[in-house]
């Protein structure tokens, strides 16, 4: 911590470790690697005092704790596509990071979203009319 940060920063939560504890090189799935990395980066970058950034940190920590607990309890890998419950849990901190409109939070969130779609962890279904559902669109 820089000396000038000592007086300006509130008692901050410690930064999360950069990787999953106990992981061995080559044993993590792509999902575990890029989701853990993105959420850890977002958590560490959302260091402001605002309610919005505290909410982002809490959301990231909740998902990271769930993923790390799941990895510790079982050797099962995430299957593609993710269940609706898992998808919603992972997407919530990414959505909040994008809504923050802060580039340092949006960049890892969008990068993670791209990888989730590219690796087929997320799949969407259109409605019977073939139109988008306006209630689920993230853009403003």
Image (tube, rainbow, N blue to C red):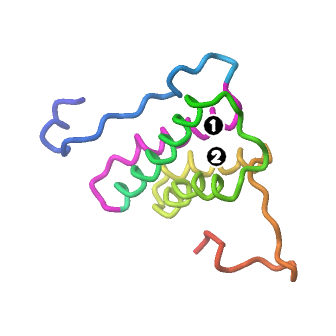
Residue at 49% x, 52% y is: 103
The quadrant the C terminus occupies is bottom right
Residue found farthest to the bottom: 129
Which mark is drawn over residue 1? none
Instruction: Please state which of residues 20 and 137 is positioned toward the viewer in this rendering.
Output: 20
Residue 9: horizontal and vertical position, in percent? 20, 44
Which mark is drawn over residue 34? 1
Residue at 53% x, 20% y is: 22
Question: What type of secondary structure mainly makes up the magenta span?
Answer: helix
Q: Quadrant of residue 50?
A: bottom left
Disc 1 vs disc 2: Cβ atoms closer than 8 Å?
A: yes
- Residue that mark 2 sits on: 111
Front of the two marks 1 and 2: 1
Q: CA distance from mark 1 to mark 2?
A: 9 Å
Residue 117: horizontal and vertical position, in percent? 75, 50
What range is drawn magenta here?
Answer: 28-51
Q: Earlier in the sequence, mark 1 or mark 2?
A: 1
- How crowded pointer 1 is (Cα within 10 Å; few <14, some 14-19, many 20+) is rated as some
């Amino acid at each position: 911590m820089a000396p000038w940060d000592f007086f300006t920063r509130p008692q901050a939560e410690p930064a999360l470790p950069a990787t999953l504890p106990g992981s061995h090189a080559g044993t993590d799935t792509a999902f575990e690697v890029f989701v853990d990395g993105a959420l850890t980066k977002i958590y560490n970058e959302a260091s402001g005092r605002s309610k919005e950034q505290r909410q982002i940190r809490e959301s990231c920590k909740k998902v990271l704790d769930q993923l790390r607990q799941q990895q510790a309890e079982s050797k099962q890998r995430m299957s593609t596509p993710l269940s609706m419950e898992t998808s919603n849990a992972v997407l919530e901190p990414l959505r909040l990071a994008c809504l923050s409109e802060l580039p340092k939070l949006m960049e890892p969130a969008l990068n993670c979203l791209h990888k989730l779609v590219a690796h087929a962890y997320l799949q969407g279904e259109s409605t019977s009319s073939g139109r988008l559902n306006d209630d689920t669109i993230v853009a403003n």
